[in-house]
Amino acid sequence: MYFEMRTYTVQIGKMKDYLRHFEKEGLPVISRYAKLVGWWYTEIGELNQVVHIWAYESLDDRIARRNALYEDKDWLEKFVPVAFPMLVKMESKLLRPADFSPIK
């Protein structure tokens, strides 16, 4: 199992709008292609960030699912044009669980 941790920095003052838009337009679409493990936003430390983790069976599975997402009209027409202008920075890390990790 592979996990992808995505950290997005949202424009100051846009967090509520981003969260609302993701919940309404983004989550239903991306959930067709990936399994959500968790979703958080920062309150202490570096502010205006959302951190979300998605699970994939393998790297090939991730590639196929992300490619399908990038072709989904709902993603491209309803989510991306509104969401992406609210973002300042996007970061993605692929993670593998250690043998002793409670989440695998």
Image (tube, rainbow, N blue to C red):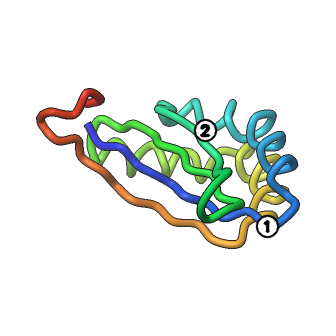
Q: Which residue is mark 2?
A: 30
> Quadrant where the C terminus lies?
top left
Vertical position of residue 84 compared to residue 29: above or below: below
Q: Is 59 on the left or on the right of 91, as rendered?
A: left
Residue 2 placed where, x, y %? 29, 43
Report the residue at 16% width, 41% height from top. Answer: 98
Using the image as rendered, state which of residue 15 and residue 83 is in the foreground: 15
Q: Residues within 10 Å of mark 1 (few under 14, many from 20)?
A: some
Using the image as rendered, state which of residue 50 and residue 62 is in the foreground: 50
Q: Is 77 on the left or on the right of 95, as rendered?
A: right
| Element type where label 2 sits in the image | helix
Numbered label tally: 2
Query: Counting residues from the N terminus, which is met first, the one under dot 1 or under dot 2?
Result: 1
Q: Residues within 10 Å of mark 2 (few under 14, many from 20)?
A: many
Residue 61 placed where, x, y %? 34, 42
Residue 52 found in image quarter: top right
Residue 96 placed where, x, y %? 24, 46
Q: Which residue is mark 1?
A: 11
